[in-house]
């Protein structure tokens, strides 16, 4: 499991689990279960990089450019990527160290159902193959490798995997590779996840692996 900051670890893990489990019921909320971590001094919005919240425009490039901007900034204390209210359709994108992904109230990061937009990655070394099928696996919607000091939080915003297309393939036996997760953090440390709804994942909601 990923170790979060010691003073936050158990309440944040509980908040993440409650949000993941409660996402299927629209009226359930875990906002306020733990205090929302403060946003960092520097802030960028996905709209600064061409993001469009109409639920149809693919925003993969906008999210990727926003994260790359944070990575280049080297701002003291890191930076926040702010996701305003609206439905932000996207393919998979990576996080970087010393960043906060903040979903405003009413913000939905929604995964594309076009499976061709999901790159394949190598199996995890401890698995040696895809979890469900031989060969590679689809990358998670939000991915972080070898990161530290990452916060994923907000005002009860939603990360929606639109997972039915993946579950249908799995049930019909037509799945070509192992399904993706909503969030995977690999070999990372100092992580906080709070006040977020994880909904309708293609597989697992949150997959921390080889973390410290």
Image (cartoon, grey):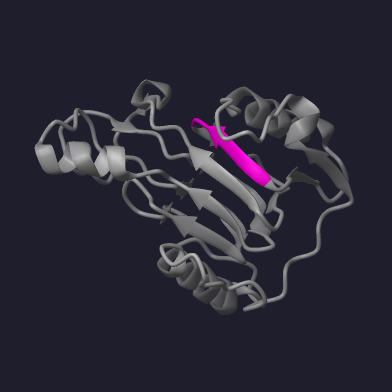
Residue at screen point 40% across, 34% down? 139
Find residue 4 and report its image quarter: bottom right
Relative to 37, say whether 64 is above or below. Answer: above
**Residue 58 visible at all:** yes
Closest to the observer, 61 or 168 = 168
Closest to the observer, 166 or 14 = 166
- Is 89 covered by the magenta stretch? yes
Q: Position of residue 78 (x, y in %)?
A: 80, 46
**Residue 145 visible at all:** no
Residue at screen point 62% across, 66% down? 195
User: In the orientation shown, which residue stands out farthest toward the left?
Assistant: 173
Which secondary structure class fits the magenta region best? strand
Residue at screen point 67% across, 76% down? 32
Q: Is residue 210 left or right of residue 126?
A: right
Relative to 161, say whether 71 is above or below. Answer: above
Find residue 29 and report its image quarter: bottom right
Closest to the observer, 149 or 106 = 106
Q: Which residues are magenta?
A: 86-91
- Is 2 covered by the magenta stretch? no
Q: Position of residue 84 (x, y in %)?
A: 73, 46
Q: Is residue 19 left or right of residue 32?
A: left
């Amino acid at each position: 499991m990923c170790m979060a900051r010691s003073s936050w670890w158990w309440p944040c893990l509980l908040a993440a689990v409650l949000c993941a489990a409660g996402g299927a019921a629209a009226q359930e909320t875990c906002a306020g279960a733990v205090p929302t971590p403060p946003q960092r001094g520097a802030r960028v919005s996905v709209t600064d990089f061409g993001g469009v919240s109409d639920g149809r425009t693919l925003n993969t490039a906008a999210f990727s450019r926003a994260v790359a901007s944070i990575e280049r900034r080297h701002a003291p204390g890191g930076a926040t990527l702010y996701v305003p209210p609206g439905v932000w359709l996207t393919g998979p994108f990576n996080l970087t160290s010393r960043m906060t992904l903040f979903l405003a109230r009413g913000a939905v990061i929604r995964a594309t159902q076009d499976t061709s937009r999901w790159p394949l990655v190598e199996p995890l070394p401890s698995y040696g193959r895809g979890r469900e099928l031989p060969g590679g696996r689809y990358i998670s919607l939000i991915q972080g490798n070898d990161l530290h000091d990452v916060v994923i939080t907000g005002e009860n915003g939603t990360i929606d995997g639109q997972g039915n297309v993946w579950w249908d393939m799995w049930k019909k036996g037509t799945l070509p590779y192992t399904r993706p997760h909503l969030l995977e953090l690999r070999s990372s440390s100092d992580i906080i996840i709070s006040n977020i709804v994880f909904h309708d994942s293609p597989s697992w909601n949150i997959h921390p692996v080889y973390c410290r």
